[in-house]
Amino acid sequence: MFSIPGGALAQDRAGELLEELGAAGSAEQADRIERELELEWSKSGSAVMDLLLRRGRDALEVSQTGPAIQHLTALTDYAPGFAEGWHALALAYYQAEMFGPAMDALERTLVLNGAHFAALRGVASIHEQLGNESLAYEAYARVLELRPFDEAVTEALERLAGRVQGIEI
């Protein structure tokens, strides 16, 4: 009997959800689809890796960046192909104001999952904070292609548009 590995099914489901998100007709519908997509992306296929992810996220929720970084580094060491582990590690580094390592982890996330809109948003935010406005603008624009109802990203694009694109006379 032929069976599809669980990871393949998760990838198929994530692809379907990304298509649904791009075609969402309302912010409420987009929010529901995003929550489902984030759940799909959080499935590592290993109970141990899921536990490390949960512990890292729990530590972040109470601003314990040191323990979060430890758990999430262990996760990425043992599961280097798990994009969500890298994304969570990026959040921990960002919260610790370690922008270089955060950017590295975001880049790893995007290598593994180029449609990870939260990672793209993180890249945009870091570029904006560092004064790389045109790179921030490009990343925010890509986020908006994936998440059409992101008000904060729309505001960021409007804020940066004049500085990046110049003012027409």
Image (tube, helix red, strand yellow):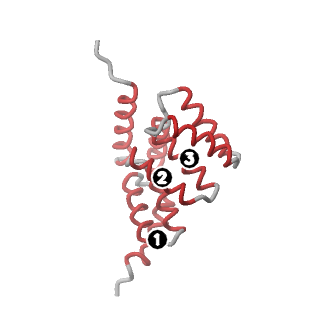
Q: Residues within 10 Å of mark 1 (few under 14, many from 20)?
A: some
The location of residue 37, given as percent across then percent down, is 45, 39
Question: Measured along the vertical axis of the image, is residue 44 above or below residue 66?
Answer: above
Please name the residue that numbered disc 2 is placed on: 106
What is the CA distance from the residue labelled 2 to the residue labelled 1? 16 Å
Question: Measured along the vertical axis of the image, is residue 54 above or below residue 101?
Answer: above
Q: Looking at the image, which residue sits at the far top?
A: 1
Q: Residues within 10 Å of mark 3 (few under 14, many from 20)?
A: many
Residue 9 in the figure: left or right of residue 41: left
**Element type where label 2 sits in the image:** helix
Residue 132's disc number: 1
Q: Looking at the image, which residue sits at the far front?
A: 77
Residue 127 in the figure: left or right of residue 93: left
What residue lies at 50% left-to-right and 57% top-to-bottom?
A: 103
Q: Are marks 2 and 1 in contact (CB under 8 Å)?
A: no
What is the CA distance from the residue labelled 1 to the residue labelled 3? 23 Å
**Element type where label 3 sits in the image:** helix
Please name the residue that numbered disc 3 is placed on: 89
Front position in the image: 165 or 92: 92
Q: Earlier in the sequence, mark 3 or mark 2?
A: 3
Q: Earlier in the sequence, mark 2 or mark 1?
A: 2
The three-letter amino acid code for the residue at tag 1 is Asn
Residue 43's disc number: none
Q: Quadrant of residue 67?
A: top right
**Element type where label 1 sits in the image:** loop
What residue lies at 48% left-to-right and 56% top-to-bottom?
A: 121
The location of residue 118, given as percent across then percent down, is 48, 51
Q: Quadrant of residue 166?
A: bottom left
The three-letter amino acid code for the residue at tag 3 is Leu
Q: Are marks 1 and 3 in contact (CB under 8 Å)?
A: no
The location of residue 146, given as percent across then percent down, is 38, 52
